[in-house]
Amino acid sequence: MTCWLCVLSLQFLLLPAAPPPAGGCPARCECTAQMRAVACPRRRLTAVPDGIPAETRLLELSRNRIRCLNPGDLAALPLLEELDLSENVIAHVEPGAFANLPRLRELRLRGNLLKLIPPGVFTHLDNLTLLDLSENKLVILLDYTFQDLRSLRRLEMGDNDLVFISRRAFAGLLALEELTLERCNLTALSGESLGHLRGLGALRLRHLAIAALEDQNFQRLPGLLHLEIDNWPLLEEVAAGSLRGLNLTSLSVTHTNITAVPAAALRHQAHLTCLNLSHNPISTVPRGSFRDLVRLRELHLAGALLAVVEPQAFLGLRQIRLLNLSNNLLSTLEESTFHSVNTLETLRVDGNPLACDCRLLWIVQRRKTLNFDGRLPACATPAEVRGDALRNLPDSVLFEYFVCRKPKIRERRLQHVTAAAGDDVRFQCRAEGEPAPTVAWVTPRHRAVTAASAGRARVLPGGTLQIRDARPGDSGTYTCVASNAGGNDTYFATLSVQPEPAANRTPGEGRNDTQAAARFPLDLTTILVSTAMGCITFLGVVLFCFLLLFVWSRGRGQHKNNFSVEYSFRKVDGPAAAAGQGGARKFNMKMI
């Protein structure tokens, strides 16, 4: 047995040693000579390994245990173009760590423990186009952090603990085209810091606790084309001037708490081609909400709380190609909501409780040519066709379920109500039709009152008009208008409100009536009396002045009050003139 062990030992000793890795590749790495790539992922490395070929262009060191980068760690790789240090435990990067990498184009530091980037870290990286600093622990961005990255086009800063971005943090990023900020602790955006990004084309702002967009946030970004705002739970309104100065082609505002279409903010975005307002608690799309978006091709309002799309809501959308209204609360979508349905190519209305009646007839007629993006809309009512996809409905169904019946007001007896001031008044207007008509009232002052109106007058469920605290000014004829897709019907009611007796008025009301009477005191008797008193006063003043003149003239004493005037004609040459001259003339004048 001992001899056999000796023989085996001798054989192992005589075996040749294993050759070193080809091309000087580190022992724990994989090298690809053709691509000049060295990959060392998941090798539990605590530092940059030695022996990396000097001609390496791509180096992957992700998912290791590297804690720090010092000057000189990468000095032997002057031809390096891509460096991936993602998902390590790097907490410090010393200035000059990348100073000897003039050809570096992509640098990934995602998923590390960086809290601060000191000045000078990115010096001499003149050709860097991509920098990924996401999923770190960065708290603040200092002034001039990126000033040497003049060729940088894409910067990823998501999933950090950022609470502050200094005003000059982005100074020097003249070529930056894309910036992503997400899952940070920022509570405001600095328009001055973003103003250094003159060439920025795409800005993504996700998962931020910012409550408002201010007017100056994007004013210095004239080249911005794509803006994405996603998961801002504190945002409840997009202010009218918040997008001023931009010429966007794509805008996405999703997963916020805005409750209305930001029509005022969209007013000047005439170049917008894609708008996404999905997953916001928007319940109504009013008429003309997108009237100025004449180039819009895609509109997404999916996953909201949409229950009503008013007629002409999409007025002005002359080039609309795709409309996504899926997963809402819509019971119908009428053709009258569109500027024109002829340009529409893709329609998403799946996930809505659709009522299959004449209002959807335009969709059924185009069901063979419209693209539903693979998600077919289905009927929720009536029960006979519940669950049936619109595309699969036979033509025979069209004449049975997709026919409208004009509204008809059931009770047409004249309603004339006389009420005292302060009373509550109600007028009934019950209408029937297919589909169920909507009821609105028109006041004597031609103001429309609907179920959504605010004030003393409103329409109750069932079409009843309620007027609270009636006043004499409410008197007149009210018109009930019941309408649906099949037409409309009208009905009239009159109201007379008697003023409240003076004995029942409060002191404040008495003063108000007195002020009103004092404001309008003129009638025929008053005008005649005032004119007579004015004339008498005027004549009295004139007579008094004459008396004063008479007394004054009598007190001057005796004086000569007449005199003689003698004159002669001007001498004119010629005998005829001489014959006509009769000598001197004389007359008396009396002074009064």
Image (tube, grey):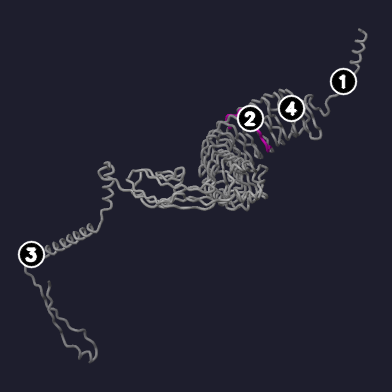
Assess whether mark 4 and mark 3 are in contact (beta carbons under 8 angstroms): no
Give percent across and percent down for residue 1.
92, 7
Residue beneath disc 4: 41
The residue where tag 3 is placed is 555
Q: Amino acid at mark 4?
A: Pro
Label 3 sits on what residue type? Gly
Q: In 3D space, how far apart are the residues under numbered discs 3 and 4 (Cα atoms)?
A: 131 Å
Secondary structure beneath dot 2 equals loop
Point out the tag, 4 or 2, that comes first from the N-terminus: 4
Magenta-highlighted residues: 128-141
Main secondary structure found in the magenta portion: loop
Numbered label attached to residue 17: 1
x, y (%) of residue 80? 74, 34
Q: Is residue 228 visible?
A: no
**What is the crowding at mark 2: few (fewer than 14 residues within 10 Å), some, or many (at least 20)?**
many
- Which residue is at 22% across, 57% downward? 526
Q: Residue at x 89, y 16 (%)?
A: 12
Q: Residues within 10 Å of mark 3 (few under 14, many from 20)?
A: few
Can residue 168 be seen here? The reply is: yes
